[in-house]
């Protein structure tokens, strides 16, 4: 059962880069993105730079957490991207009209941990891997309290 991305993440407007969450089962989630000319990072004549795939991965991780939160009656919340290891893309751009599936697989088995790490892949319409990375993030149990403590 898929869900609109807006239902699973606090991202909005032009910075919401994924269109929908396709699934979230066990330790794996998948999102879908169609590359359009109105995409904030679109370059006419080329498409969307492949380095933006890193953000597709991060938003899919956030929406995976949001999916779980919504299932528990909670609102989706923010997380903090810590970094990425070995981002590799098979090409320089994602083409206009291309449908991408971003798949993230948790490398840590406790979904309630604040530190998370995911093996991420972006697949083209044929299922070929066109980008891959390990993405690490921090998801505090109470993001508002965490931010207030940082500003104190």
Image: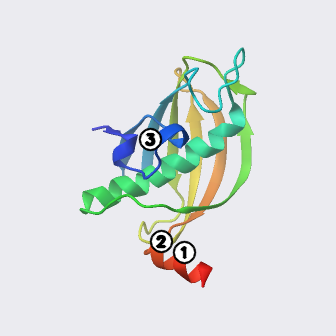
Residue under the point 55% across and 42% down:
15
Q: Which residue is mark 3?
A: 30
Of 88 and 42, nearer the camera is 42
Q: Is 60 rendered above or below residue 91?
A: below
Q: Is 48 rendered above or below residue 76?
A: above
Tell me which colouring the rendered structure shows: rainbow
Q: Nearer the viewer, mark 1 or mark 3?
A: 1
Residue under the point 75% across and 27% down:
92
Question: Horizontally, is 76 left or right of 127 in the view?
Answer: left
Q: Is 104 rendered above or below residue 22?
A: below
Q: Earlier in the sequence, mark 2 or mark 3?
A: 3
Residue 8 image point, x, y percent = 37, 49
Residue 43 image point, x, y percent = 70, 23
Residue under the point 49% across and 31% down:
33
Query: Residues under labels 2 and 3: Cα distance?
Result: 24 Å
Label 3: which secondary element: strand
Q: Residues within 10 Å of mark 2 (few under 14, many from 20)?
A: some
Instruction: Give the quadrant of the N terminus.
Output: top left
Q: Earlier in the sequence, mark 1 or mark 3?
A: 3
Residue furthest to the top in view is 45
Q: Is 131 rendered above or below residue 118?
A: above
Of 53 and 142, nearer the camera is 142
Question: Horizontally, is 115 left or right of 85 in the view?
Answer: left
Q: Residues within 10 Å of mark 3 (few under 14, many from 20)?
A: many
**Is residue 34 visible in this depiction of the protein?**
yes
Q: Which mark is residue 143?
A: 2
Q: Which residue is mark 1?
A: 147
Label 1: which secondary element: helix
For the residues bearing labels 1 and 2, Cβ distance under 8 angstroms:
yes
Q: Nearer the viewer, mark 2 or mark 3?
A: 2
Label 2: which secondary element: helix
């Amino acid at each position: 059962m898929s869900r609109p991305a807006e239902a699973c993440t606090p991202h909005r407007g032009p910075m919401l880069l994924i269109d929908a969450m396709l699934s979230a089962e066990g330790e794996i989630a998948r999102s879908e993105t169609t590359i359009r000319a109105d995409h904030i990072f679109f370059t006419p004549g080329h498409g969307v730079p492949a380095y933006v795939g890193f953000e597709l991965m991060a938003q899919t991780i956030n929406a995976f957490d949001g999916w779980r939160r919504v299932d528990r009656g909670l609102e989706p919340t923010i997380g903090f991207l810590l970094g990425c290891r070995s981002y590799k893309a098979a090409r320089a751009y994602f083409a206009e009209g291309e449908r991408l599936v971003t798949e993230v697989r948790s490398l840590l088995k406790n979904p309630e941990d604040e530190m998370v790490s995911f093996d991420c892949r972006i697949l083209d319409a044929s299922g070929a891997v066109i980008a891959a990375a390990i993405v690490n993030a921090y998801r505090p149990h109470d993001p508002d309290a965490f931010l207030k403590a940082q500003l104190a």
